[in-house]
Amino acid sequence: MSTVTTRDETKKPRRSMGSLGDKTFKGFAYGAGIIILLLLGAVAFFLLLQSYQVYTASSEEIATEVGFSRVGGEQLTFWGFAARALFGTVLSALMALAIAVPLAIGIALFISHYAPRRLSQALGYVIDLLAAIPSIIFGMWGMWTLEPLMKPIFTWIEDYIRPIVVFFTGEGETVDGEVVWHGGFPGLSYAAQNWEWWPINPDTLSISAGPARNIAMASIILAIMVLPIITSLCREVFIQTPRLQEEAAMALGATRWEMIQMTVLPMGRSGMVSAAMLGLGRALGETMAVLMVLSAGLQVNFDIFSVGQHSTIASRIALHWPEASAGTADNPSLEQPFLIALGLLLFVLTFVVNFIARGIVNRRKEFSGANA
């Protein structure tokens, strides 16, 4: 009896210590989650508190107190200004994704399934290092090195691709001070002639004189910046593919590319979507690199090779913040609240993008590592 009692007495402290550890870890995990929510709520509350007067201000107050709200001789309301900046933000980010995602998937497949082991390790280190380069370095490199290299490519696109667009849409010609539209298919010609926002338009591929500081150049810089992030995540996703499935596909006579089509890409689809959405979030909020390579404008069109047409929310905030006035306690100004309100819209946009991405990822449960 004494031996049994001793064993029970030695077991009880262990059980209580395990229970204490579980409770401590559970409390720490809950606390960390609550802190994240509180931080996000505090940021949103700050942005709303500092900018609420802009949402209630009249058009006359905006025109009087916000000097940069007049663009190209046109006086814009806050929502008009925000809509145009939001259009440029989304356009540049989507163009960057269209460039970066195929390249990132190809690089990730090469590293995970084609390259020798030593080469794949070296490439992995290089890609991880690229993600640590500051955005201002990318901006300077793009402005002084990449832009002169891309200008001939843009010119080639205008010389050889634009005539194809003109064949379908027609082209305007100035005759006696009036624009006369000729050629093209009826529906496409009417849209290109009357709708400035129509994407299939000869002006879409027309290049402005001078440096190529346009939205296409900004999108290329953004694509290079988000490429390491998307590549790293895709590489980790592709490595998680079960080895037995790959070997089974190869045993059935599949080539390496057929094996990747049958096993790697289907298993990594959710992970690729997550990587693309993470890159999209980075591209939406990028500031300095875009500011340095983009000649700012606030137009709603798809003239991607023309300067002074588009701008992003983040670059607009960085451009106007040094000269924006906060006013005084007795006579507050709307300039800084105006820019903070733009920041709140960007904050909401990133949340919407993340929720959409989460919904897309949750549609496929086969790869648990992508949505754990």
Image (cartoon, rainbow, N blue to C red):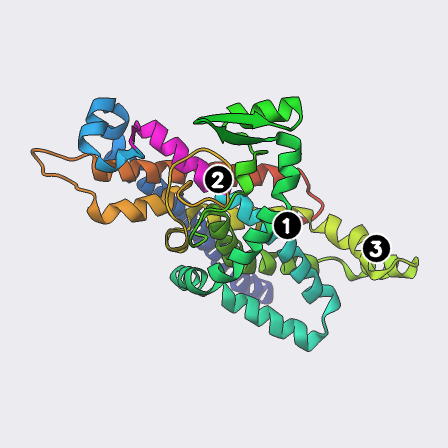
Q: Amino acid at mark 2?
A: Val
Q: Is residue 310 left or right of residue 275?
A: left
Q: Confirm whether residue 290 shows in the render.
A: yes
83 part of magenta stretch: yes
Badge 3 or badge 2: first in the primary sequence: 2
Q: Mainly helix, strand or loop, the magenta region?
A: helix
Give residue 336's position: percent from left, percent from top. Answer: 22, 40
Residue in the picture at 41% in, 35% down: 299
Q: Which residue sits furthest right?
A: 252
Query: Which residue is at the front of the view, 310 or 16?
Result: 310
Number of residues whose C-alpha sits closer than 10 Å to that of mark 2, classed few (under 14), some (14–19) or many (20 or more)? some
Q: Amino acid at mark 1?
A: Met
Give residue 318's position: percent from left, percent from top. Answer: 31, 49
Query: Which residue, given by chain and number where applicable, does mark 1 sit on?
Result: 272
Magenta highlight range:
73-91
Badge 1 or badge 2: first in the primary sequence: 2
Q: Amino acid at mark 3?
A: Glu
Q: CA distance from mark 3 to mark 2?
A: 35 Å
Residue in the picture at 42% in, 64% down: 144
Q: Confirm whether residue 278 shows in the render.
A: no
Q: Which mark is nearer the camera, 1 or 2?
A: 2
Give residue 157's position: percent from left, percent from top. Answer: 60, 49
Badge 1 or badge 3: first in the primary sequence: 3
270 part of magenta stretch: no
Q: Is residue 139 left or right of residue 123?
A: left
Query: Which residue, given by chain and number where applicable, does mark 3 sit on?
Result: 258
* Disc assigned to residue 90: 2
Q: CA distance from mark 1 to mark 3?
A: 19 Å
The correct choice, above or below, for 134 with respect to 167 in the image is: below
Residue in the picture at 81% in, 58% down: 257
Query: Which residue is at the front of the view, 368 or 32?
Result: 368
Is label 1 in contact with label 3 (beta carbons under 8 Å)?
no
